[in-house]
Image (cartoon, rainbow, N blue to C red):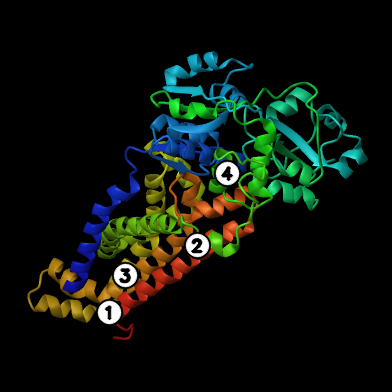
Amino acid sequence: MKNLRTCWARFCLGFLLWLPLNVLAAGEVQVGSKRFTESYVLGEIVRQTLQGAGVPSTHQQGLGNTGILVQALDSGAVQVYPEYTGTIVREILKREGNPTLEELNQWLAPRGLKVGVPLGFNNTYALALRESVADKLGLKTISDLAKLPAGALKLGLSHEFQVRADGWPALQKAYGLALVPGSALDHGLAYDAVKAGQVDLIDIYSTDANVERYALRVLVDDRNFFPRYDAVLLMRATLDDQPLQALAGRIDEGTMIALNAQVELDGLSFAEVAQRFLAGAAGTDQGGAATRQSFLDRLFAPDLLRLTVQHLALVFGSLLLALLVGVPIGIWAWARPRWAAGLLGAVGVLQTVPSLALLAFLIAALGRIGFWPALLALFVYALLPIVRNTHAGLAGVPQGLTLASRALGLTAPQTLRAVQLPLALPVLLAGAKTAAVINVGTATVAAFVGAGGLGERIVAGLAVSDAGLMMAGALPAAVLALLVQGVFELLDRRWGRPATA
């Protein structure tokens, strides 16, 4: 027991000393991006541009929707990310029209933000469907959709488009559409779904590389509902954007489509596409023929160590917190049987909260994205097995041993430390093992809020509908779960005891 306490103390001290050095990237410019191909590519171009100018920077990939990125900007967790003027006007500022950059900066100034570096292309929203369906129903414009009854088409609209101020609700009202959207569909999966006939109508971006590939008809916005979505960089007012001015006007619509195609059709990584573009090889053969990465290349890519370390920090950091809080709660519940059922039930209810909902709540509560909201969410999910197993382990200690220790003159706290907790240790370790293994899988969701980990690959693969990239994240996570389970098996053999003892 003494050896266990010594090892545990060393682990806690080492983790607490390591955490500030590895989780907080002090002095680096944090570049953000949304969860679709173009935003990943532009975010990586921004990062590499800053790095080339001697500015240390990190790319926080795939941070979800506009709301999360803006909150990250407001809190300083992110300093810059690629955005579109139409989104800034309608979704962030809640205004109308197509203002100039000067007007936008006047409106953004009270929030400590600014916009600049117009990249050179307009990426507007649009609606698209298969040519065969469009010909059958005679659809060429969005106004033609108004002739259709509610159930004529099955819609596969993205989550954000269904709720945006410039999305489906306002579009439906402007055109008088009777069509009703069904369940939301991730943008990265929409093209395969419409190709397979699972949905008929999807929202797209005009620079998507898959429009031509899937032979889709883009409906004309004949009432000019959608504003201009000129690509710009949205950033904190304090950021020096001089190193980024080299990107102004450098990316036209054709170039952006080619960059997206290199990811979605050629299978190149975001970093490689950005590197080729900055080297002057975007959309051409100047930098050599593009070669699709093999699965092994993706699996053992240079980011594997970084993502694994981040993943382990989330898992063991949350486990440490859960043990520090959960073990005392389990002891308290065991010592007060009348309260045990209610307390265990309350802890159990916490585990029923959906992970993304819990992350959203914690982001709002903490006012930041990244490691800490994810760590606290995983801590909540780790509590139940630790509290329950601590309670069960202590309840399983034979009453005779407790009475014997008290007869020898030990106080209640001494009996707890010297007799009851050591005997309950195998059950407690089983709870810690369960919590750790569960959190290895759950930690992949942390990538949605910029906490890193192996989930980054899964989220990126989902964004571009790339099963290989998703597997390159899922396989290491599964191996990590097996290794964590093995470590706890060794701990159980070293400090545990047979259940029959």
Residue with the mark numbered 3: 428
> Of the residues shown, which amino acid type is indicated by label 1?
Arg
Residue with the mark numbered 4: 276
Task: Using residue 406 as the reference point, say whether residue 363 is left or right of it.
Answer: right
Tell me which label, 3 or 2, sits earlier in the chain. 2
Whether residue 185 is visible, yes or no, is: no
Cα distance, mark 3 to mark 4? Answer: 53 Å
Residue 471 image offset from top left, x and y in percent: 57, 61
Secondary structure, mark 1, is helix
Tell me which label, 2 or 1, sits earlier in the chain. 2
> Of the residues shown, which amino acid type is indicated by label 3?
Leu
Residue with the mark numbered 1: 494
Tell me where residue 200 sits by quadrant.
Answer: top right
Residue with the mark numbered 2: 300
Residue 121 image offset from top left, x and y in percent: 65, 28
Dot 4 crowding, Cα within 10 Å, few <14, some 14–19, many 20+: many
